[in-house]
Image (cartoon, rainbow, N blue to C red):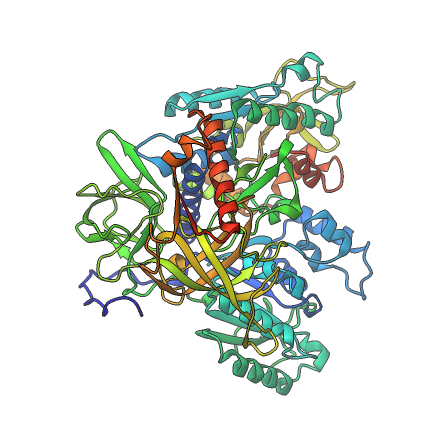
């Protein structure tokens, strides 16, 4: 790992540069904080970019009410510790209609509780730019994403209308009705994120580290029973298995992996030797062909 | 050269040896036309260097069965083609970014389309690269396409080229075929500023000379493609390059006032003098700050904040510089650019010049020549449109700190922005620049805040929405004035 530390410093400097450009060019930025490892790195870069001052923008979390309890505790602790403004937004209309990951297909649930909620929160806050922790290595349609990703009215992503980005010059001049998603971690890989977390000794949600946790096996995926809302199928009994998560989202839709990686060094080791890509554990992505591209066109992050 | 004579080299403590591992990351562009097997070559490199996860391998193998393939089990190009529309059409339109690493190095692969109608996409991708892999088909050799791609790489400042002569299996692994293609390319490359050209014979489909050595080409004693990429020197800057730090923003915290930015070139230490070329004022660096503590030196690529001993009163757009070798405080410049927008150049449209951190209004702009890809010669012209490479003359509404691209690429490049919708319409490199060509007030109409607030914007307050409307009206007024030939400077 030490042999590759130098490239982490290059990625860090690039990320800080992007955060500063966005803060300088946009009127009202917000940092979309989803509590996971990528958000942790993103927030760390934002803190570095403005140090000794605080980042001049709030954090925004879209809370579907189905996040792991550990995530919510970590979110609140982080905002408190760094003295940052945290905006939590939930789609209460969706909640009132009882839109949930058990009764609705992942695509419907995600659209209402995440995509629509995000659009509403950005509109309500009057934000013209939102930082996100998306990486180009995550998924094929993201491999072509820009650092400043423009969204037309209604937050629609038009792949053919994206602006070319040359050298390190970032053009943030908005056209009418446009907003921007800013991706400072564009050139990072999952392995980079973990090595950077180790290098900088950053705190992450404990769910990333292996521990005995109650799970059931469904369609070959390990689903953790995080609270009493779990609907067990006939014959299902939660059992304690040594698991951890590679990615964190809504607990009924996020599969765990069996693992013995109980600390950061073990996680780095495991990620670098991984035999499957990280999004294999995200049930929403398997819902339809080119799922992510469809979601992005509709305004998903 | 606009700068003064080279400064005497300052005695410095020796730096640790720079091994390839300390140059950490290599960004490589792959170019060549679709038929040359570009996606296959990169796919093969990822596949053989174990950069593909198992579930991806399965998905690719599965998808390969849906395509017509000539006896090959895996379609490596599926690793690279991303967007739905492109997958359906089987072509690469946009730029795709891929990442992989070996024991020594982290690689960023920038995959850009090769067709002539996508010249702008290729130029965009190339602008991020440290090295370009230029593919040619061994059966066809150097083509018009090859020449054009080399020209684009040269335009955006790539210095290191790898000529990958592909499909060697289809020319019976012939050394003489390879050597003659190499010779032809080296001769054509003489008209460019490449400093490092390496030619490698490969066969991407069976994988010869990509990651593993080829037993079929015993005559070839050079490195495989991956060996070469792992040993390239990149990111190491010469000692005598002048310091530049374009200011992104000013950080304030209590008594602290730091000029935040990324070092674009050169290096700086506490105690050294710097100057803001625009105002001509100088100061001494007191501290170089980061959240991890103060630095004893900041080098090219470091994102830092600089605290000075005196308040220079500079803001975003200023370039803190070496005091002897300063940038040009230019308001007239010549540039070579690639036109990126679908909408062609319009001398009456409003444009803005986006440099490292400045955004300066363009008062007038004209095209003087277009570059012919066949001959690489320039021919007089007055218009340019999507995918054209043009030479142009630009007059700015106010001076901005610039360098010549050939000397300092990071502060010598720009993008041209539409003042109307904000679109990035062109990207260019500065070939000549001069200060003081226009004096503000003599023949430039200044639209300042007071003038606008009195009349056109008298109904607006200072809410964010009103301020945005204020700016919009100012731009619209400027566009109308420019359209009747009046140079306008917006100062609000």
Please state which of residues B152 and A266 is positioned toward the viewer in this rendering: B152
Residue at point 52%, 23% (across, down): A125
Q: Is residue A256 left or right of residue B278?
A: right
Position of residue A112 measured from the top left corner of the image (x, y, whole percent): 68, 24
Image vertical order of residue B119 relative to residue A154, above or below: below
Q: Is residue B78 left or right of residue B454?
A: right
Residue at point 67%, 15% (across, down): A93
Position of residue B372 measured from the top left corner of the image (x, y, whole percent): 59, 74
Q: Is residue A155 left or right of residue B241?
A: right
Residue B224 visible, this angle:
no
Image vertical order of residue B431 relative to residue A43, above or below: below
Specify the quadrant that holds the C terminus of chain A: top right
Image vertical order of residue B126 relative to residue A27, above or below: below
Q: Disc count in the image? A: 0
Position of residue A78 measured from the top left corner of the image (x, y, whole percent): 43, 24
Position of residue B58 measured from the top left corner of the image (x, y, whole percent): 72, 49
Residue A93 visible, this angle:
yes
């Amino acid at each position: 790992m030490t042999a590759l530390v130098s490239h982490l410093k290059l990625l860090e400097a690039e990320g800080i540069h992007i955060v500063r450009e966005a803060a300088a060019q946009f009127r009202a930025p917000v940092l979309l904080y989803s509590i996971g490892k990528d958000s942790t790195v993103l927030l760390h870069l934002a803190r570095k970019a403005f140090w000794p001052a605080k980042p001049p923008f709030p954090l925004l979390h879209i809370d579907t009410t189905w996040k792991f309890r550990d995530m919510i505790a970590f979110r609140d602790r982080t905002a408190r510790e760094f003295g940052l403004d945290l905006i939590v937004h939930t789609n209460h209309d969706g909640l009132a209609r009882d839109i949930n990951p058990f009764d609705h297909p992942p695509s419907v649930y995600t659209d209402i509780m995440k995509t629509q909620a995000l659009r509403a929160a950005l509109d309500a806050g009057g934000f013209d730019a939102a930082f996100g922790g998306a990486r180009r290595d995550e998924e094929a349609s993201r491999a072509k994403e820009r650092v400043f990703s423009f969204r037309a009215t209604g937050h629609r992503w038009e792949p053919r209308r994206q602006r070319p980005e040359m050298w390190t010059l970032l053009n943030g001049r908005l056209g009418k009705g446009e907003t921007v998603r800013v991706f400072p971690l564009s050139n990072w890989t999952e392995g980079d994120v973990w090595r950077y977390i180790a290098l900088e000794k950053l705190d992450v949600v404990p769910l990333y580290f292996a521990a005995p946790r109650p799970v059931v096996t469904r369609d070959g995926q390990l689903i953790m029973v995080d609270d009493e809302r779990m609907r067990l199928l006939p014959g299902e009994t939660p059992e304690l298995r040594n698991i951890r998560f590679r990615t964190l989202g809504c607990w009924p839709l996020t599969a765990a992996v069996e693992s013995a990686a109980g600390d950061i060094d073990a996680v780095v080791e495991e990620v670098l030797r991984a035999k499957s890509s990280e999004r294999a554990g995200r049930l929403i992505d398997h819902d339809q062909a080119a799922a992510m591209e469809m979601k992005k066109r509709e305004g998903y992050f | 050269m606009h700068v003064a004579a080279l400064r005497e080299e300052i005695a410095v403590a020796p730096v640790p040896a720079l091994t390839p591992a300390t140059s950490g990351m290599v960004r490589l562009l792959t170019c060549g036309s679709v038929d040359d097997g570009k996606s296959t070559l990169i796919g093969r490199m990822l596949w053989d260097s174990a950069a593909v996860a198992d579930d991806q391998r399965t998905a690719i193998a599965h998808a390969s069965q849906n395509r017509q393939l000539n006896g090959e089990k895996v379609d490596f190009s599926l690793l690279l083609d991303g967007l739905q529309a492109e997958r359906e059409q089987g072509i690469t339109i946009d730029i795709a970014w891929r990442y992989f690493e070996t024991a020594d190095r982290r690689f960023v692969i920038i995959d850009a389309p090769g067709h002539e109608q996508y010249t702008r996409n290729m130029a965009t991708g190339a602008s991020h690269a440290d090295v370009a892999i230029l593919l040619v088909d061994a059966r066809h050799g150097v083509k018009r396409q090859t020449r054009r791609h080399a020209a684009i790489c040269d335009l955006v400042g790539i210095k290191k080229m790898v000529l990958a002569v592909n499909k060697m299996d289809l020319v019976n692994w012939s050394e003489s075929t390879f050597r003659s293609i190499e010779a032809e390319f080296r001769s054509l490359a003489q008209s460019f500023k490449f400093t490092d050209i390496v030619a490698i014979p490969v066969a991407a489909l069976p994988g010869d000379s990509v990651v593993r050595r080829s037993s079929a080409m015993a005559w070839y004693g050079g490195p495989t493609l991956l060996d070469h990429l792992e040993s390239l020197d990149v990111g190491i800057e010469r000692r005598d390059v002048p310091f530049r730090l374009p200011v992104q923003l000013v950080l304030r915290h209590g008594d602290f006032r730091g000029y935040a930015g990324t070092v674009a070139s050169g290096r700086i230490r506490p105690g050294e003098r710097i100057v803001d070329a625009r105002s001509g004022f100088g100061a001494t660096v007191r501290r170089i700050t980061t959240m991890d503590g103060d630095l004893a030196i900041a080098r090219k690529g470091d994102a830092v904040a600089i605290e000075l001993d005196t308040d220079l009163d500079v803001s975003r757009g200023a370039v803190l510089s070496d005091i002897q070798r300063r940038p040009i405080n230019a308001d007239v410049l010549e540039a070579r650019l690639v036109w990126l927008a679908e909408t062609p150049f319009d001398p009456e449209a409003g444009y803005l010049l986006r440099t490292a951190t400045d955004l300066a209004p363009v008062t007038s702009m004209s095209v003087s020549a277009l570059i012919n890809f066949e001959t690489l010669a320039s021919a007089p012209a007055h218009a340019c449109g999507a995918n054209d490479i043009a030479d142009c003359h630009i007059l700015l509404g106010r001076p901005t700190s610039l360098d010549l691209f050939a000397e300092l690429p990071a502060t010598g490049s720009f993008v041209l922005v539409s003042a109307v919708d904000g679109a990035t319409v062109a990207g260019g490199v500065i070939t000549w620049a001069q200060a003081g060509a226009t004096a503000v007030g003599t023949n430039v109409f200044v639209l300042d805040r007071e003038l606008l607030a009195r009349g056109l914007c008298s109904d607006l307050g200072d809410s964010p929405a009103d301020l945005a409307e204020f700016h919009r009206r100012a731009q619209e007024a400027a566009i109308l004035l420019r359209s009747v030939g009046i140079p306008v400077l917006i100062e609000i």
